[in-house]
Every structure is written in C-alpha cells, then in structure tokens.
Amino acid sequence: MWRDESVTYQVAHRSVPEIVDLLRHADAVHGLHYLLMHALFGVWDGGLPALRLPSAVATAVAAGLVAATGLRLSARPAVGVVSGLVFAVTPEVQMYAQEGRSYALVCALVALATWQFTGLGPDAPVARWCRYGAVVLAASLLHEFAVLALLAHGVALLLSPDATSRTRRCFAVTSGAVVVALAPLVVWSTAQSGQVSWISGPSLREWCEIAGFAALALGCRWWLTRRAGRAGRTATVCRLALPLALLPTAVLLSAGVHEPVYVDRYVLYSHIGLALLVGTALVRAADAAGRVVRGRAARAVAVGASALLCGAALLPVSVQMRTPESRKDDVTAIAEEAGRLSAGADAVLFTPARRREWTLSYPGRLRGTTDIALARSPAASGTLQGVEAAPTEIGRRLALSRVVVVLGDPAGQPPDTDPGERVKRHVLARDFVVCARTDLKGGRVTLHARTVSLCPAPAR
C-alpha cells in the first residue's frame, strides 16, 4: 500500500457523516469513490484485496468494452480482440488496475460511454442518449477530468460525415446536461484547489512519455489512413480514437499555462483511444504480412513470434509495476518498521505532519505510544491527517517525552518551513540522540531518546 491508497483506506473506514464532514474541507473530487469504498468495506472488510478489487474488475471490464468498441467500429473481430489486449497489457493501465483509487473505475465508465457513443446513430431514441449522459456524468463525478471525454466524442462527431443535425443536437443537449449537473462539484472542489498545489509542470521524462504517446497515436493514424483515406471503417476508428487519445492530455497541458493540473493518471482513459489505434494498426500490419508470408502455418508462426517479442519487451515493466518500488512510498513497510522501533518508546512524532498518513491505515502498529503533536484526530477534525497543536505546545509535549519514534521524509528532501515543523526539528536536535534509523522506500523511521542509556532494543 502506498500513501494515496492509504488515504482511500482510512477515509472509507470512517462513518458516512465523518466522510461528508471531510468532503466539506478536502478531497471533494474523490468523495463518490470514498462513499463507494465505504459501502464495499461494509459488506467485506477484506483489507488490501478488497481495496484493490474494484480497480482490477474495472480494468477487466474496460478491456472488454475496448474490444467491443473496436468490433463495432471496424466490423472485424480481430480488431476488437487485439485492441482489448493492447489496452490490458499497457503498463500504465496495469499499474492502476492494482491500485485502490478511482482511476480504473473512471476508465471503465469512459470505455462504457465510448461504446455507447458508437451506437448513437441518427435514429437513436432519447432514452439511449440519457443512458450515455448518465454514464459520462458518473465517470465525471468519480473524477472531474473524465468530462474531457465528452470533448473527444464531440470532435469525433464533428468530423463524422454521417452525423445528422439531430445527432449533433442530441449530443449538444446531453453534453450541456452533464456539464450543468457536474458544475456544483466543480465549484465545490475548486475551493479546495490548494490540495493540488503539489502538481508541477511535467518533467523532462514525462514530456518524453507524452511525446512518445502522441507520436505512436499519430503514427498509427497515418498508417491506417494512408491508403484507406477518410472513408471506410478504418477512418471511422481514427475519427473517434485519435481525439480520445490526445485531446484530454492536450487540454490539461494547455491549462497548465494558468496552473499546472496535468497528471497522467487523471487521463488514464486516453489509453482507450490509443489501444483502438494500435490494435487496428496491428491487424492491418498482420493483413499486409499475410500477403507476403505464404501458408497458414507460417503466418501463425510469425504472429506467435511477434506476440512473444512484445510480451518479452513488456515483461520487465509489468513485473516492476507489481513491486513497492513502482510507487512513491511503501506505507506497509514504513508502518511495520515504526511498530518494530516503537518497542519501549512512549511517543510518536510525524515530521512533516502529513506523514501521519503512513500509520492511519495501520493504527495497531504504534499501540502504546502517544501522538504527541496531535490536537484533533483526522476523523474528529474532518481532515485527512488531523490537526496538530500549536508550536509551543508541541515543544512542551516533546520536552516531556523520553523515547520518541519519528516518521519523516527520506534524506535529501527540503525541510518544511512551517513553525510547528521547525520546533520539532529544533527540540529533537537539541535534546535527543539518535538510537536507530531505517531508510525505506519514500520515508525514514528514526528512534530518538533523551540519552544513549535510554535507547531501547528494538523488537526483532
């Protein structure tokens, strides 16, 4: 478990009134997901497997819907199957398939909406448009940026030579209804925009990934339309898939001129468009190869060899994404180490305070110690990590402690300038010695004591 999953886990285990109280102050954008997970834990409190099960199921459903969309657009089963497989093996999709957050669920709903969109012909009844709008709204309530899928669908409709005025009118009305229904959440969460102040512009590596993603999408589109032109089933795939692959990311990057908001997981559903493009291109390439390679057996060998090469190339990445090293931190390991070092300690301190998140999902690990900086618990204060006491009170409490377990950032991180954090660092440096220190993925656990003679022997 890493810190974002820990937030989901500990918030979902609060009561509904406590969750609603939290949403008044923070994380309104994730409110629906917290309530859904609260309901799931009410039925089955299965720990980490229960936390991640919805994402795993949602990813499987999304892969099936990508396949169904590819089949509907191309009228070729091979395109559907390959597109669904491409989506399922994409590294980023695999990453969020095993994470207890909302992104895989959003992706599944966008995949469902995209499949519905492909069936909205000129004579589609109003009820079908209502179902489409309801799915887009559900996805957007889980994460607001899912509404950008509407923009991609709108561009596809605008580019379609077969779209009638009725179809465009129905789409405009449906889109307007979704936006109006979503507006209260947008206004509510905008007031909490300080929570995403940590987002900076994409790094050089991220820019390279974005450029590679776009180049692959555009390359597939060129390959697919260089002979087919703008007519036929292949062009229909491109008209829908290319905007879905590129537009959501482009909009978030453009918004970054005002304030950075782009994070790749926010537009995970753009992989639906890429999978449709890549899947269709691979089938087209196989068709071309079939005209060169004679004999069914030879073609089967060629396809099998290609699949093995692709699998071998993706295997290291897929394995790495299933290890703690693929995340920013390892909450489970940090909590376990804190519990080990806390044997004989009388207090625990988090510096910075937001690192309290590391133990909120494992409260039993630090049983017997006092959180000396805490004034109000997370649930009681309607916050994610609680409210700490005034700096002078923190200093007074720390001065009365004998042995303290400190959970903090790893080496090399800039220290927080908050007055309370400065007091913590000052008192620890002045009045305590370090008994033991363990560096873990994304964090550091340190055992402090007043004197060397007070240093306890950590539990083994």
Image (cartoon, rainbow, N blue to C red):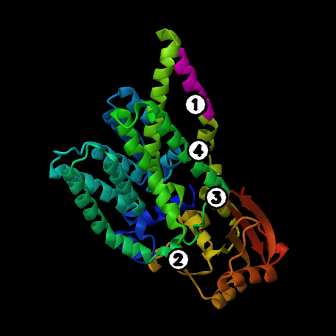
**Residue 134: x %, y % from top left:** 26, 56
Q: Residues within 10 Å of mark 4 (few under 14, many from 20)?
A: few
Residue ID at (27%, 64%) = 176
Per the image, the residue denoted by label 4 is 322
State how far apart marks 3 and 1 are (Cα): 35 Å
Q: Which amino acid type is shown beneath numbered disc 1?
A: Gly
Name the one closer to the observer, 286 or 448. Answer: 286
State how far apart marks 4 and 1 are (Cα): 16 Å
Which quadrant of the structure image shows residue 121? top left
Q: Main secondary structure of the magenta part?
A: helix
Per the image, the residue denoted by label 3 is 336
Per the image, the residue denoted by label 2 is 386
**Residue 201: x %, y % from top left:** 60, 64
- Image: 233 above or below 158: above
**Residue positioned most to the right:** 452
Name the one closer to the observer, 439 or 284. Answer: 284
Q: Residues within 10 Å of mark 2 (few under 14, many from 20)?
A: many
- Image: 371 above or below 326: below
Q: Earlier in the sequence, mark 3 or mark 1?
A: 1
Q: Which amino acid type is shown beneath numbered disc 2?
A: Gly
- In this rendering, position of residue 449 left or right of residue 7: right
Give the secondary structure at mark 4.
loop
Give the magenta-colored segment's residue range: 301-313
Q: Earlier in the sequence, mark 4 or mark 3?
A: 4
Give the secondary structure at mark 1.
helix
* Mark sitting on residue 311: 1
Asked if the residues shown at circle 4 and circle 2 are in contact, with their CB atoms under 8 angstroms apart, the answer is: no
**Residue 24: x %, y % from top left:** 40, 77
Q: Residues within 10 Å of mark 3 (few under 14, many from 20)?
A: some
Give the secondary structure at mark 3.
helix
Q: Which amino acid type is shown beneath numbered disc 3?
A: Glu
**Residue 449: x %, y % from top left:** 77, 75
